[in-house]
Structures are given as C-alpha cells and as structure tokens.
C-alpha cells in the first residue's frame, strides 16, 4: 500500500452495492486488517462509520469488502498526523452521544448506529 494513490474520503459515496461484488477473499487477512482499523478508529473518528460497515462482513468477506478496507487505508495515507490527542484533565464527567440511520443497509435493511463518549473531556468513538 506504500505506493498506492491516496483517497480523499474513507468510503465511496453513493451506491453501496459495489461492496458485495467479487469473489471470496482470505478471511484471516481481512479480519486482521479490519481489527487494526477498529483499534485505529479510536484516534481517527472520521473512519468510524466506514470501519463499522466493513466490520459487518468479517464472517464472509468478498473482494468488494476488501476494496472498501483498502480505500480506508488509502484515506489514512492521505491524512497523516491527523487524529485525536488525549489530554490530561481534572474534569470527571462522562457524556454519551448516539446516532443511527434508519434501515440504511442495502442488503438486509438493518440500521447502522454509532456512538461517541466524552470521558473526562476526551472523545472516544465506538
């Protein structure tokens, strides 16, 4: 991926059906990449939604899903040194914010939800 062309967005906008095209791929490699992206999304909240989408297909990934993972990696290449930095604070408050898209999945019409928490003034995303 070192010589790949960077992307300006972590996920392709528009038709999500491209994610379901292609032959099956190595499940272990896919799970390893997505697992690392999940950990990375704690400091890069902008990739959280895209990572949650590719995370839904860990059990049976195809080439379209792997291409979506590669797109996230190329986006990270486009934006080095960006992300969250956690600061030391004396604030002892926890806040939680949530959002969901109603029946937004094109394959099973399930909703995708997400939330972020503010722990002692620092944002963490899940």
Image (cartoon, rainbow, N blue to C red):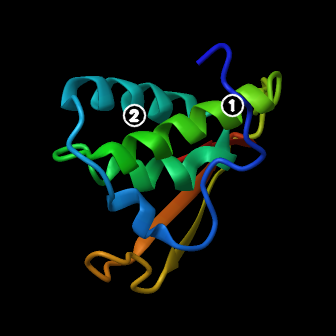
For the residue pair 77 and 45, the one nearer the viewer reads as 77
Quadrant position of residue 63: top left
Task: Classify mark 1: residues with Cα within 10 Å, few (<14), some (14-19) or many (20+).
Answer: many
* Residue 64 in the figure: left or right of residue 1: left
For the residue pair 34 and 65, the one nearer the viewer reads as 65
Q: Secondary structure at mark 2?
A: helix
For the residue pair 24 and 36, the one nearer the viewer reads as 24
Q: Number of numbered discs present?
A: 2
Residue located at (64% from left, 66% from top) = 13
* Residue 18 in the figure: left or right of residue 41: left
Mark closer to the chain start, 1 or 2: 2
Residue located at (58% from left, 39% from top) = 72
Q: Quadrant of the N terminus?
A: top right
* Residue 112 in the figure: left or right of residue 120: left
Q: Which percent across, then down, holds residue 49?
A: 54, 56
Residue located at (56% from left, 29% from top) = 40
Instruction: Tell me the number on the disc at residue 56.
Output: none
Quadrant position of residue 41: top right
Q: Residue furthest left?
A: 59
Q: Residue furthest top?
A: 2
Instruction: Tell me the number on the disc at residue 34.
Output: 2
- Between the C-alphas of marks 1 and 2, the distance is 13 Å
Q: Which percent across, then down, holds residue 25?
A: 24, 35
Q: Is residue 25 visible?
A: yes
Q: Secondary structure at mark 1?
A: helix
Q: Which percent across, then down, holds residue 56?
A: 31, 54
Residue located at (53% from left, 60% from top) = 115
What residue is disc 1 on? 76
In the image, residue 44 sits, relative to residue 18, either above or below, namely above
Task: Classify mark 2: residues with Cα within 10 Å, few (<14), some (14-19) or many (20+).
Answer: many
Q: Which percent across, then down, holds residue 14?
A: 60, 73
């Amino acid at each position: 991926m070192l010589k790949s062309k960077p992307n300006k967005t972590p996920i392709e906008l528009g038709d999500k059906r491209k994610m379901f095209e292609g032959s099956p791929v190595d499940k272990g490699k896919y799970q390893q990449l997505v697992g690392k992206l999940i950990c990375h999304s704690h400091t890069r909240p902008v990739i959280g939604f895209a990572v949650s989408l590719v995370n839904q297909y860990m059990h049976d990934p195809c080439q379209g899903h792997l291409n979506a993972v590669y797109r996230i990696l190329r986006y990270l290449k486009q934006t080095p040194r960006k992300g969250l930095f956690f600061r030391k604070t004396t604030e002892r408050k926890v806040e939680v914010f949530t959002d969901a898209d109603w029946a937004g999945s094109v394959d099973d019409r399930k909703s995708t939800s997400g939330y972020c928490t503010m722990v002692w003034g620092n944002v963490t995303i899940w």
